[in-house]
Image (cartoon, rainbow, N blue to C red):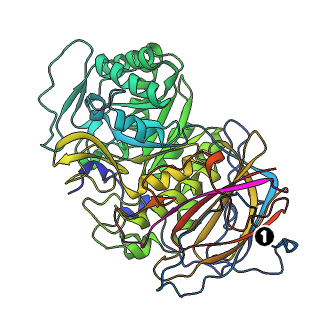
Amino acid sequence: MASPDHMPGSGQSAGSRRPRRRKAGKAKVVSLVAAGALAAGAAITVPLALNAGQPEPRSTPTSSASAAPAPSPKPVKKAGVAYYKQAGPQATATTAVPPMTVNVSAAELGTSLDPGAVGLSLEATDLADPAMSSANADLVATLKGLGKPLLRFGGNAVDRRFFWTSTGEAMPGDRRGDKAHPVRTATPKDLERVKTLLDAIDGTINITVDLGHYDPARAADMSKHAARIFGKRLVGITIGNEPNGYPDNGLRPGSWGIPDYLNELKSYAEAINSAAPGVPIIGPGTYSEAWWKAFAKTELPQQRIVSFHYYPLSSCSGSEPGDEPTLANLMSDYMHPRVRDYDRRAMAPAAAAGLQTWLTETGPSACPGSNPTTKNHASALWYSEFALNGLQQGIKRLGFHSSLITCVGGPPLSPICSGGKYLQPDGAIRENPSYFGLAMVSDLGTGKFLKLEQSGGGLSYAYAVKHRDGSTNVYIANKNDPQKDAQASVTLSLPGKPKTGTMTQMAGPGYTAEGSTTIDGRKALPVANNKRPMVMNFVEGSSVQKFPLTSGTVTVLHFTY
């Protein structure tokens, strides 16, 4: 069974933490040129038009689209140049996919892909895990594959079975755990060990202090040591985990609500600011819109960052069929717009207050145990495009909930896990398919999102990022079923005439395939851009490139001009 730490608190009904399913409108070409974008700081606007931000799925060309690009010259392969050899469609993949057209503009969208945009969410008790160290070479290598990730320590553990002390106090008797989720004490020495890991991966950290057991002074003490030890790598402190669920999980009485939370939040924030001046408060870390709004409107002594949690498919009993963790729902053409709209709802209160929005804990489902949203190639496709969907909208950081419990018997939701027998880790770190999906996002590097228009392609979604050196990355997630759907014929119009165009691709044999997700045919990270083969059919100097993409793939194309 998966850890109950992957379950969000139950303070709100399923319907209140997820937008109700709506019937998708007619497909159409959608332009990003007019889409609003969320940027850090003041003067922020959130795109609210239904079709802004990214195109609706299964779109088809219409006369309202941009002028069709000029025909591209026929490709002529150069001697001595390696071209990408994409795995062809399977014999069963015979369902035609509408041709896909992507027109990338030179104009910036207004949002950016920043260092540490994709990270992992862990339990607060993991701070006391000796594996969280630079001495763990496997873990260091794995985390480096996510760029310069943010490690967020919080989860249900922080308010239930976690204890901080800098003076050697004994663990209080009211903390409760079990064999798989033991109670743990963290001390300054633990933070020093975690600091070595952050240095090794050039990462950052967001710690969560215990609000379940009200103690502002203890929280301030932990914050003081964290600020001293982590320095600039400490990007924020969260006060409690999903406090909107406290009345239902016994951490507060049933009458406790937003006003009570805000009073306690202010007391904690003042104590923390005195001990660790200037460290931002990241909150409220809930799945309730009313709590996001209340936090965004509440003045604190330090900077604030609005955070929310989101697990789209968490109707574990199936009482809400559209929210049940099924393969059909995970790969539905409704998934992309529902995620986009939910993200915008979360960003709206932050935008009104001139604040950033972070999605600090997420995954496809919070239901315990294995289900069709975990450990398979479909999850790799979902994680990857889900991340780009939010980042392009303007969310600055995402934390995908994870665990270092053994792969055998551990939480299947986690992008990573430990090798060895159940609860007997052998020191090796294993990557689940979802990890490779996130690695493809990290491969985009940093830069500014560009406006683009997309049509066709079925369950395909395109994003474009411009880098400081003027080069462009184009990301295309072809989420069509690799066992049923034929290749998509892609016509890509670029904002310039490329000198080079290289390619890397994540692929898998089918939605339900486990352990078969690869990048460029290997269970490894992409090689450097200068070592990658050219895009199939690449034509140097042509702003229009045409190539096929196999279904069930995520492709990153890199162009220099």
Q: Residues within 10 Å of mark 1 (few under 14, many from 20)?
A: some
In front of the other: 247 or 182: 182
Is 153 situated left or right of 119 in this image? Answer: left
Tell me which amino acid carries mark 1.
Pro
Give the residue at the far front of this rendering: 79
- Where residue 196 appears, x then y in whole percent? 39, 23
Is 526 situated left or right of 498 in this image? Answer: left
- The image quarter containing residue 127 is top left
Which residue is found at the position 72% from the left and 43% from the top?
A: 467
Instruction: Please give the residue where the numbered disc 1 appears in the rendered image.
Output: 75
Asked if residue 189 is positioned above or below residue 176 in the image, the reply reads: above
Boundaries of the magenta span: 497-513
- Where residue 523 appears, x then y in whole percent? 42, 55
Number of labels in the image equals 1
- Where residue 386 appears, x then y in whole percent? 52, 58
Is 535 situated left or right of 561 in this image? Answer: left
Can residue 207 be seen here?
yes
Q: Is residue 522 magenta?
A: no
In front of the other: 305 or 427: 427
Asked if residue 343 is positioned above or below residue 273 in the image, the reply reads: below
Q: Is residue 510 magenta?
A: yes
- The image quarter containing residue 173 is top left
In front of the other: 65 or 168: 65
